[in-house]
Structures are given as C-alpha cells and as structure tokens.
Image: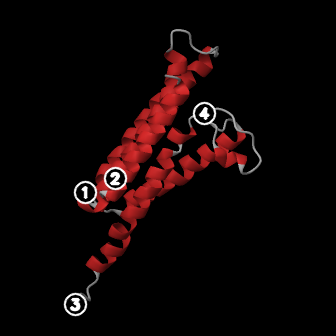
Amino acid sequence: MSVQDQALIGGVIAFAVILTLFFARNRLGRLNTASWLVILGALVIVGEHGQFALSITIAPAPMNLLPHARLHFFMAGIYTIIGAALLCVIARTLLKEGRHSGWYVLLFTLLVGAGFDLVMEGLWYQHGSPLYQLFGGESQGFGWEFLYSYPVAWITALVISYKPIFKDAKAQASPMKS
C-alpha cells in the first residue's frame, strides 16, 4: 500500500471518528465529546508534523541536514509531542469541566496553529489540497485528507462545547432562577 493510500485511509478514518463522536455527543456528554475531539486532533498533529520532524532525523539514512538543523528538527518533533500532550490534558480537565479558559485555549490553538498551517501550506507545500486550487495555486503532494481532519475536529469541539460552557453556565449562575 502506498503512502498516499495510507494518508487517504487515515483521513477517512479520522473523519469517520469525528462524525461518530458528533452524533454521539448527547449520549457521551457534549463536553466529554469535545475533549475527545481535541485529543483526536492532537493525535493527527503528532502523526503528521511530529512524526515527520522526528523521522527525518532518526531514520537510518536521514535527510541531508546540517547537524544543527537536524537537532532543531528533532526537538521540534519532541516539543510537538509535549504540546499535544498538554493540549490533551487541558481538554480532559478545563474543557471537560466547562471552564471558559479551556475553550479559549482551544480557540487560540485552532486559530494560531491551523491558521499558520493553512497559510504555510499555501506558500510552501499544499499536500494536494483542492482548497489552494480555488485560489489559482498549483496542487502538489498528497495527504490533505488526513491533515485537515484536526481543524475539523477542533471546530466541532468548539461548536458543541460552546452552549454548555457559555450559555448554560450563565443560566446556572443567574440569581433570578424561577
């Protein structure tokens, strides 16, 4: 099986999990579901960016990198794993508990992370995404199906957790309950 096929299958599986969690949100609890969607997105990032950064440095025949650059690629992969782990902890605590700060951390991570991801992909390497063809860019590469699943997972998490965190919290805190 080619790497392209593996990326496509990974994307189909990721989107199937997102849909399954979305439709099970009432049964699982909206905040619990949102936290699992964040974890899914973090796993996609580690599987794409972190794995790539590490694999080009520790492979038997690593890319022709200067030792200095090789160290930075390696540490970028390590910090990707650490950042994803911290995001998962935030999802399973602050977001799941319905804290505003957990929701805002996820929003910030989505806007900055996915924002830079989309812009830099447009400038450097599009992963074969049809999105950039709409703006006249050329399509190169593959794997957009898998890579684009994390912003979808995080947007879904933000949407389904918004009401329980912001609107339901205001109703519960209101001193004028009837």
Q: Amino acid at mark 2?
A: Leu
Q: Amino acid at mark 4?
A: Phe
Instruction: State if disc 1 and disc 2 touch (CB < 8 Å).
Output: yes
Q: Residue at x 57, y 40 (%)?
A: 144
Q: Which mark is residue 21?
A: 2
Residue neighbourhood size for the residue with mark 1, other residues' Cα within 10 Å, grouped as few (<14), some (14–19), many (≥20):
few
Figure coloring:
secondary structure
- The secondary element bearing badge 3 is classed as loop
Q: Earlier in the sequence, mark 4 or mark 1?
A: 1
Q: Where's residue 45, x and y in %? A: 47, 38
Q: Which residue is mark 1?
A: 28
Q: Nearer the viewer, residue 139 or 155?
A: 139
Q: Earlier in the sequence, mark 3 or mark 4?
A: 4
Q: CA distance from mark 3 to mark 4?
A: 56 Å
Q: CA distance from mark 3 to mark 2?
A: 34 Å
Q: Earlier in the sequence, mark 1 or mark 3?
A: 1
Q: CA distance from mark 2 to mark 1?
A: 8 Å
Q: Which residue is mark 3?
A: 178
Instruction: State if disc 1 and disc 4 touch (CB < 8 Å).
Output: no
Q: Where's residue 148, x and y in %? A: 53, 45
Instruction: State if disc 4 and disc 3 touch (CB < 8 Å).
Output: no
Instruction: State if disc 3 and disc 1 touch (CB < 8 Å).
Output: no
Q: Nearer the viewer, residue 2 or 95?
A: 2
Residue neighbourhood size for the residue with mark 3, other residues' Cα within 10 Å, grouped as few (<14), some (14–19), many (≥20):
few
Q: CA distance from mark 4 to mark 2?
A: 26 Å
